[in-house]
Image (tube, helix red, strand yellow):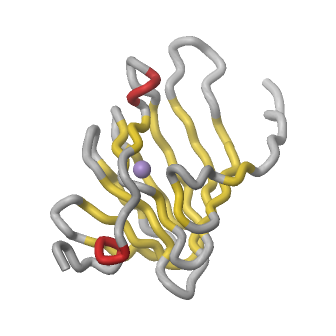
Amino acid sequence: MNIEPTRPTIKNPPEQFAGDVWVDMIALPHEEDQRMTVATVRFAPSARTAWHSHARGQYLHVTQGVARFGHRDGTVIEVHAGQTLYTPPGEDHWHAAAPGSFMEHLAMLEAGDDPATTTVWKEHITDDEYDGRPGA
Ligand code: MN
């Protein structure tokens, strides 16, 4: 056994994140048959991801602040510290901090059979989607 190396905090890229979002990796696979990845992700107020999906789904456990998670049907779910959101495999969604609130969550997911499908990135969300106003 070992203490895992401390990795530097990474600023997430603007192609996939709007606003300031930082990630600290906690767990990455060591062995060929391991799939689990866990990270702490911190969002500045109103910062958000682009639309995306995960081959094997994802668990998002909010540890601080107020989060928003959006679905293609226009549903926006507000999630508070201590609650866990689950997104099924292949389902488009986005993650965000609510306005006026930093948000931190643990992101837990498994690699896809094709690693390129672990997370499939799509277009940025609109302000209307962020505010739960589909088609506005
Ligand atoms: Mn996700």
Residue 114, by quadrant, is: top left
**Residue sitting at 35 percent across and 69 percent down?**
126
**Residue sitting at 61 percent across and 57 percent down?**
41
In the image, residue 6 sits, relative to residue 17, either above or below, namely: above
Residue found at the far bottom of this picture: 100
* Residue 80: image location, x then y, percent: 45, 76
For residue 58, side relative to residue 106 (left or right): left
For residue 103, side relative to residue 124 (left or right): right
For residue 102, side relative to residue 111 (left or right): right
Residue 65, by quadrant, is: bottom right
In the image, residue 19 sits, relative to residue 46, either above or below, namely: above
Quadrant for the N terminus, please.
top right
Closest to the observer: 71 or 89? 71
* Residue 69: image location, x then y, percent: 36, 66
Residue found at the far top of this picture: 32
In the image, residue 29 sits, relative to residue 125, either above or below, namely: above
In the image, residue 126 sits, relative to residue 25, either above or below, namely: below
**Residue sitting at 51 percent across and 77 percent down?**
46
Q: How many marks?
A: 0
**Residue sitting at 63 percent across and 31 percent down?**
28
* Residue 53: image location, x then y, percent: 34, 43
Closest to the observer: 84 or 94? 94
* Residue 59: image location, x then y, percent: 42, 50
Quadrant for the C terminus, please.
bottom left
